[in-house]
């Protein structure tokens, strides 16, 4: 019998309490605070507040907050980004222990290398969302289908079969993901055009997308055509592409449509965008396990027309 999320949360809390003792404090039935310090410096601590959600761990991460008066912007960003990577590398698994030990490791590193402030002023929303990795991806990968030079063998390519996910609603903003297997850049343009034939999608606030097409796998070191688009939601496209890279998704394009509801969501908007994409990637077999070396299932249409 499969364990429920509640049963897995209960087991995780029992294990955390056993491991961390008095440093793990229950605030309410679904809310816990864990005090984390570096191994050789007890004076610089971080409080990790965990709020369990109904979907954790099977369907998404728990909500959390980090508090530490001494922790400055750039260092805080580094921790936030690292926790996101841990989540993406352990989808559906219990995370709290992994998060705590990752924070402990980074606190030690921050104390050894220096606690830096961000170089530029950022908004309160952005302070907890954007790190060097996102900026690098935005600079190197943010491109359009027209800028990719992929060899054309003269074949006719069909518009791929597009599947849309469930609508996610948060404070009147609505998010919905779309996914399709793609093998040529021509299909990415077809997918975008097909989606925008729907007037509601065409008039949405943002249509964020990312794509990853296998270019070459010779020598055991695959290379890819990669692209992403923010469509006005700064850094959202690069974060979406980062998700595809983390799960090693191949020959796939994901688009997340957002209709703004009038209330600023802060960092939650990026969580919703990635979760809409992640659910579809998982449902359609594009998330490659660490052991798996075979390609994803992508027989649901969209390769070449028979000549």
Image: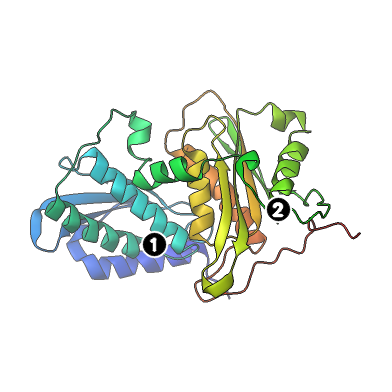
In the depicted structure, whether residue 121 falls above or below residue 28: above
Q: Does residue 160 appear anywhere in the picture?
A: yes
Image location of residue 300, percent across then percent down: 78, 60
State which quarter of the image contains the C terminus.
Answer: bottom right
Pointers 2 and 1 in contact (C-beta within 8 Å) = no
Mark sitting earlier along the chain (2/1)? 1
> In the image shown, does 227 or 49 lie closer to the viewer?
227
Image location of residue 89, percent across then percent down: 45, 63
> In the image shown, does 11 or 251 lie closer to the viewer?
251
Residue 181 appears left or right of 95: right
Residue at 34% from the left image edge and 39% from the top image edge: 128
Image location of residue 261, percent across then percent down: 57, 26
Q: Does residue 271 appear anywhere in the picture?
A: no
State which quarter of the image contains the N terminus.
Answer: bottom right
Residue 113 appears left or right of 292: left
Image location of residue 50, percent across then percent down: 34, 51
Q: Secondary structure at mark 1?
A: loop
Q: Residues within 10 Å of mark 2 (few under 14, many from 20)?
A: many
Q: Which mark is residue 95?
A: 1
Cα distance, mark 2 to mark 1?
36 Å
Residue at 30% from the left image edge and 48% from the top image edge: 78
Location of residue 214 (image quadrant): bottom right
Q: Secondary structure at mark 2?
A: loop
Q: Which mark is residue 184?
A: 2
């Amino acid at each position: 019998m499969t364990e429920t999320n509640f049963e897995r949360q209960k087991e995780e809390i029992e294990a955390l309490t056993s491991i961390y003792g008095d440093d793990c404090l229950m605030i309410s039935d679904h809310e816990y605070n864990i005090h984390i310090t570096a191994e050789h410096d007890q004076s610089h601590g971080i409080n990790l507040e965990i709020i369990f959600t109904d979907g954790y761990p099977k369907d998404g991460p728990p909500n959390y907050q980090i508090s530490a008066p001494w922790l400055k912007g750039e260092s805080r960003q580094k921790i936030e980004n690292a926790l996101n990577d841990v989540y993406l590398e352990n989808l559906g698994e219990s995370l709290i222990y992994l998060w705590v030990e990752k924070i402990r490791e980074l606190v030690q590193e921050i104390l050894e290398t220096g606690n830096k402030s961000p170089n530029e002023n950022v908004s309160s929303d952005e302070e907890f969302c954007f790190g060097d990795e996102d900026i690098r991806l935005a600079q190197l990968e943010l491109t359009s289908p027209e800028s990719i030079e992929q060899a054309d063998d003269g074949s006719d390519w069909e518009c791929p079969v597009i599947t849309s996910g469930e609508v996610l609603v948060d404070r009147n903003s609505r998010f919905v993901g779309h996914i399709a297997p793609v093998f040529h850049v021509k299909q990415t343009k077809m997918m975008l055009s097909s989606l925008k034939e729907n007037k509601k999608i065409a008039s949405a606030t943002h249509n964020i997308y990312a794509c990853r097409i296998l270019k070459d796998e010779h020598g055991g070191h695959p290379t890819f055509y990669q692209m992403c688009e923010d469509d006005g939601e700064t850094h959202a496209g690069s974060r979406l592409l980062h998700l595809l890279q983390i799960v090693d998704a191949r020959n796939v394009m994901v688009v997340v449509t957002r209709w703004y509801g009038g209330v600023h969501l802060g960092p939650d908007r990026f969580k919703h965008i990635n979760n809409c994409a992640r659910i579809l990637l998982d449902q359609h077999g594009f998330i490659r396990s660490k052991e798996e070396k075979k390609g994803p299932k992508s027989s649901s249409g969209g390769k070449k027309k028979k000549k």
